[in-house]
Amino acid sequence: SMQMVAEDRDHVGAPLIFLSERGDLAARLEAISAGGVVYCVKPVSADTLLDRLNDQLLRESARDHRVLLISDNPIDAQKITASLASLGLTTQLVTQPLETLQSMHQMEPDLILLDMDMSSLGSLDLLMGLRQLTSIADRPIITYSLHSEASRQLAVLEAGGDYLLNKSLFTSHLLPTVLHALQRRLSWSRKLAQLGRRDTLTGLFHRGHFLEQLRESVE
């Protein structure tokens, strides 16, 4: 059946999810070759299947979010804004780094893109300053630079950045990285919300959440 799907996968627009009794690596690789994005081994619980389905929905919902771009290079900024717009992402550009906080309060971005080669202000210092803000503690910060050697990457990670992209590979790496970062944030937010609704030992809903769901069902 996987071979049949593989032959027709160009005509399938929806994500492919495989349920199988096999859990070996060969079966998983075959599913990936057929275009599968999720592979579950039977028996699979309803909660597990719903989690995997939600992860795929989050991948699509990540496209409708806000990005704050901090850069003093208008040419790069124009290209980045156009690329993000192709995914349905709204971008606000900050050309003066000291105006970043004002723009953040106005926009409340879901993700921050930071140019590490700005001449007007030390980008590493700005990155550290942003990470001190509790209001964006869970926001991904993607940085990019002409210099992405190991020492530079380590400095970015220590300062609070999540990614460092090389400008020479920017065109091919930017969009997948942005989508991955947004999807990861949404996934973690959903899982944290679930922890607040369920007892970690029994897996049952907390009384407050159960009564709330019951009230909504009755209404």
Image: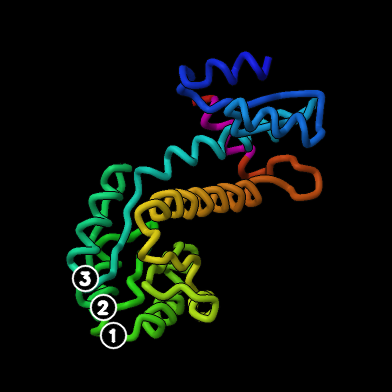
Against 94, residue 97 (above or below) is: below
User: For the point 81% across and 27% down, which residue is it?
Assistant: 22
Tell me if 97 is positioned left or right of 176 in this view: left
Across and down, in percent, residue 193 comes to: 58, 49
Amino acid at pointer 1: Leu
The reply to whether the magenta stretch includes residue 218 is no
The residue at which mark 2 appears reads as: 97
Q: Residue furthest left?
A: 74
Residue 213 part of the magenta segment: yes
Name the residue rendered at 39%, 51% in the picture.
172
SS at circle 2: helix
Callout 1 secondary element: loop
Q: Tell me what residue is drawn at x 76 percent, y 23 percent.
A: 20
Left or right: where does residue 147 sit relative to residue 43?
A: left
Q: Residues within 10 Å of mark 3 (few under 14, many from 20)?
A: few
Along the viewing direction, whichever of 195 and 191 lies nearer the viewer: 191
* Residue in the picture at 46% in, 62% down: 140
Foreground of the two, 64 or 6? 6
Q: Nearer the viewer, residue 160 or 73?
A: 73
- SS of the residue under disc 3: loop
Q: Earlier in the sequence, mark 3 or mark 1?
A: 3
- Please give the label number shown on residue 192: none
Q: Residues within 10 Å of mark 2 (few under 14, many from 20)?
A: some
**Which residue does the numbered mark 1 point to in the structure image?**
121
The reply to whether callout 1 and callout 2 are in contact (CB within 8 Å) is: yes
Q: Amino acid at mark 3?
A: Asn
- Give the residues in magenta: 210-217
Q: Residue under label 3, please give it.
A: 73
Query: Residue 135, image x and y in percent?
Result: 42, 69
Structural crowding at the residue carrying mark 1, measured as other residues with C-alpha within 10 Å and reported as few (<14), some (14–19) or many (≥20)? some
**Front-most of residues 106 and 90:** 90
